[in-house]
Amino acid sequence: MQNNIENKKEVKPSAWFILIILVLSIIGITDSTYLTIKHYTHSDINCSILDGCNIVTTSTYSTVFGMPVALLGIIFYISIFILVFLLSNKGKKKLLKSLFVISTTGFLMSMWFVYAQAFILNSYCLYCLISAVLSTTIFILSGIMMLKYKNIKEINKNTQYETNN
């Protein structure tokens, strides 16, 4: 009989993974903060490439339960930043699972808002599209990490060793 230590529930993503998602989340926080400030100050948005920023950000699709979507974006990107920071320090698989769940939610919401821009409003907001690209990239990266660490299991406190016959 051979004793093997059971797979730990530790996740050690590469420094590049951590750095990329942290940078993407900071860009997302900045982007969403800009849109949130413009929402509350009722200021025009400087949309240099596309013409539809003000149409999109003042439409009925720009708020959820009276809250600007951009404010939800700030919450989303701060959550991503905190989770990735904790993941880099703690390496717990539950943090990676939380990152994946939150990034999936952000991705699905972004896809809805891109759909609304393209097929309902027929206008595009550059800052909204930037956020959609950011959330999609974070979703893909977190999905890759989930696949990489999918076989890591939690250590049972009563059984720290696995016996193979």
Image (cartoon, grey):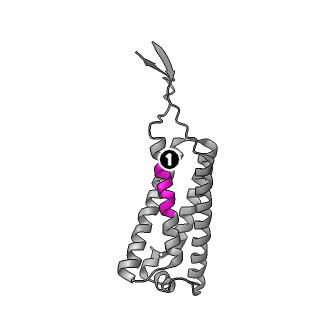
- Residue 37 lies in quadrant: bottom right
The correct choice, above or below, for 153 with respect to 39 in the image is above
Q: Position of residue 16 (x, y in %)?
A: 61, 51
Where's the N terminus, which quadrant?
top left
Q: Position of residue 61 (x, y in %)?
A: 42, 78
| Horizontal relation, residue 34 to residue 69: left or right | right
Q: Position of residue 29 (x, y in %)?
A: 60, 67
Q: Residue at x 51, y 47 (%)?
A: 96
Foreground: 164 or 41? 164
Query: Residue at the top extreme?
Result: 1
Where's the C terminus, which quadrant?
top left
Q: Residue at x 46, y 80 (%)?
A: 124
The correct choice, above or below, for 100 with respect to 45 in the image is above
Q: Residue at x 49, y 50 (%)?
A: 98
Foreground: 151 or 158? 151
Query: Residue at the left extreme?
Result: 119
User: Tag 1: residue type?
Assistant: Met
Q: Position of residue 34 (x, y in %)?
A: 61, 76
Q: How many marks?
A: 1
Residue 143 drawn in magenta? yes
The correct choice, above or below, for 28 with respect to 62 in the image is above
Local secondary structure at mark 1:
helix
Residue 46 drawn in magenta? no
Which region is colored magenta? 135-145
Label 1 Cα neighbours within 10 Å, binned few <14 / some 14-19 / many ≥20: many
Q: Main secondary structure of the magenta part?
A: helix
- The residue under label 1 is 145
